[in-house]
Image (cartoon, rainbow, N blue to C red):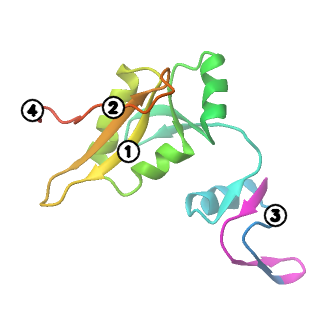
Amino acid sequence: MKCLTKVKLKVRTSEGIVDLEPGQEVEVPEELAIRLINERKITPLEDRPWLIYSEILQDLLWAASDEEAREKLLAKGVKEVIYTEAEIDLLRGVSKETVRQVHEAKKVFTGSKVHEVIQRKGGCDEQASLSPSESKESQPGLPNLKEGSQ
């Protein structure tokens, strides 16, 4: 898989150890590429979406590189929830419960996007805002996804 390095990397090749600089193109075996993509060390140059089964969500979802890739999936009639790389980045480090709540909201509000995730201080859970994909304007989204919150 062709990828672009995001950080400095030392890699072992058949020719020995090679230093890679950010922005270098590199061919990586798919199994290793997935690990390095997850670690945010490389990004795929191939713009292909991934259909993933999430153990946390107990559901299938699509991971797309950007809005354009997301729109292509929607145009093909994909029924599963679609997350862009930017949305996934916003959800990193939040609680599993918040991720589940966001996923359920995205299932109900078809085409919605994660706009922001706010972590509140004082032991409270996170808050995520979704905005509809149809609107090109900035949307405040949903103020809170937790039941009983104002």
28 vs 38, left or right, is right
Give the number of the disc on residue 26.
3
Instruction: Locate residue 1, reporting x and y percent.
Output: 79, 53
Q: Horizontal and vertical percent for residue 93?
A: 36, 58
Mark 3 secondary-structure assignment: strand
Give the percent coordinates (x, y) of residue 59. Answer: 43, 32
Please tell me whether mark 1 or mark 3 is closer to you in this view: 1
Q: In front: mark 2 or mark 3?
A: 2
Query: Disc 1 to disc 4, how far (Cα)?
Result: 20 Å
Q: Main secondary structure of the magenta part?
A: strand
Horizontal side of residue 117 vs 68, given as left or right? left
In percent of the image, x 41 and y 54: which residue is there? Answer: 92
Q: Residue at x 56, y 58 (%)?
A: 38
Residues in magenta, as a range: 1-16
Query: From mark 4 to mark 2, how far is it between C-alphas?
Result: 17 Å
Q: Secondary structure at mark 1?
A: strand
In the shown orientation, is residue 33 left or right of residue 59?
right
Q: Amino acid at mark 2?
A: Gly
Q: Which residue is mark 4?
A: 148
The amino acid type of the residue labelled 4 equals Gly
User: Of the residues under marks 4 and 2, which one precedes in the sequence?
Assistant: 2
User: Alpha carbon of mark 2 to alpha carbon of mark 3: how far?
Assistant: 39 Å
Verify CB contact (< 8 Å) between mark 4 and mark 3. no
Q: Which residue is mark 1?
A: 116
Which residue type does callout 3 highlight?
A: Val
Element carrying mark 4: loop
Q: Quick one: label 2, few (<14), some, or many (20+) residues within 10 Å? A: some
